[in-house]
Amino acid sequence: MATPASAEERHATWLELFFDLVIVAAVAQLAHLLHDDVTWETVLVFGVAYYAMWSVWTAFTLYANISGIRTRQRAMLLAMFGIAVMAASVPLIEEGEPRAFVIAYIWCRFMGISSFKRENRIVTEWPGVQQAVGLIPWFASLGNYEDERIRYGLWIVGIAVDVFFSITRSRDPKALLEEERRDLERSLRRRHREADLGRVAQLQAANPDRPHLGERLGLFVIIVLGEAVAQLVNAAAEGGHWRMPLFMVVVAGFGLLVALWWLTLRYGPSSAPTYGVRVFALRLTMPSHYLTTVSIVVIAAGLGALAAHPEGHVETSTRVVLCSGAALYFLTATLMGARGGANWRWVVGWGVPSVLVCALLGVFGGPLAAWALLAVLLAAALWHIAYRRVSGSGADDDSPEVAPAGHEPESAV
């Protein structure tokens, strides 16, 4: 048995790091959806497709976190292949041919459910990763529909069921565990496998390794930040000539990404100053992680579009994409900060104003040049970084504190 000291020293394995590589490709494919002629339909497809791939990554990350050295390499690699198929199928969704994407998603989710069953553990803090009920609308979406909005609606229902189940059922883990035990017993008796009834008593609630899980969630944030850097660099490289507008866009854009990286390392994935105040249960950690990372991907798409066209008028769709991503990032941080016990002065003086600035910039920022647009967003991020110095709540040094996830969640959260 691992000692507490060895558990604290656990880090991502080579298998987990290799598994993460497919997310790099997936994020790149998704970011391209938001480059040109962005419509509400495009935004919907982006959000749904991102959730699908994120949820598969989440399921297998939790599986590897709980299984430890018992993690099945074949399951992880097959899931990696499934995410790769989903990523390659993203352009087909836009063309009205989403079946490959949907089938790959359903296959990956069922592999995740099967992997957890082999461990005989129940993830009571985020049980949706082990349930198939949210996949029913995805199955239904494989039908032939003349109106694609019906298909999109089914996907939204599937996601809503997933999230609703995870949040509501995780509030009473003991009841959930007992229900799962009764379901397992009925299943074994129905299949006349009374000899395996000992598994019922052995079925236990899974206890995630929280420091390791915190590291894994943080690595995902680094991946999407890396894609943002790639978007900026690739667009600048294709521009050819380093004129002043391009140079200023690259400087401001890179500064914004550094600020987002700093906020994540200082305060943890929620980017709110709640370090040492409260550790969230997974029913709050996972949704906030999705919102934070999806907002960074949206910002990445906006940065790539700005660097590709740094001079002249900024397209409305580009401005809205970039500012919406920044507004969502700061909104998530503000909500998690308020829920997690951040100082009310931070919420009123830092969180809410940053959201409003980004939203207003998206609506009224049309006259601004590309570099000026980024400069305002960078100023909002720097204002967050300056919180400790301005508020006098602590030294603002150059060594960011990584907010650990290595404590048990408070029951009230």
Image: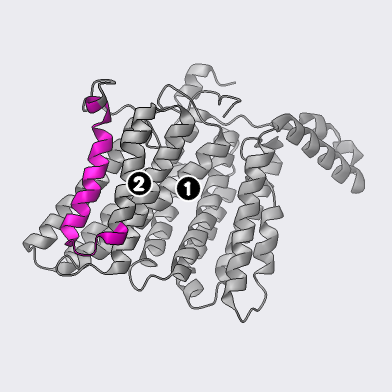
Answer with mark 2 or mark 1, whichever residue precedes in sequence: 1
Q: Nearer the viewer, mark 2 or mark 1?
A: 2
Tell me where residue 356 appears, x and y as whole percent: 33, 48
**What crowding class fits label 2: few (fewer than 14 Cα within 10 Å), some (14-19), or many (20 or more)?**
many
**What crowding class fits label 1: few (fewer than 14 Cα within 10 Å), some (14-19), or many (20 or more)?**
some
Residue at screen point 31% across, 36% down: 350
Q: How many numbered circles does the render carry?
A: 2
Residue at screen point 52% across, 18% down: 4
Please name the residue that numbered disc 2 is placed on: 355
Q: Tell me the magenta residue range.
A: 362-390
Q: Nearer the viewer, residue 309 or 1?
A: 309
Q: Main secondary structure of the magenta part?
A: helix
Residue 375 marker: none
Residue at screen point 33% across, 50% down: 326
Q: Nearer the viewer, residue 118 or 125?
A: 125
Residue 75 falls left or right of residue 21: right
Is residue 332 visible to us here? yes
Tell me where residue 29 appears, x and y as whole percent: 40, 64
Residue at screen point 33% across, 62% down: 320
Residue, far bottom: 146
Please name the residue that numbered disc 1 is placed on: 290
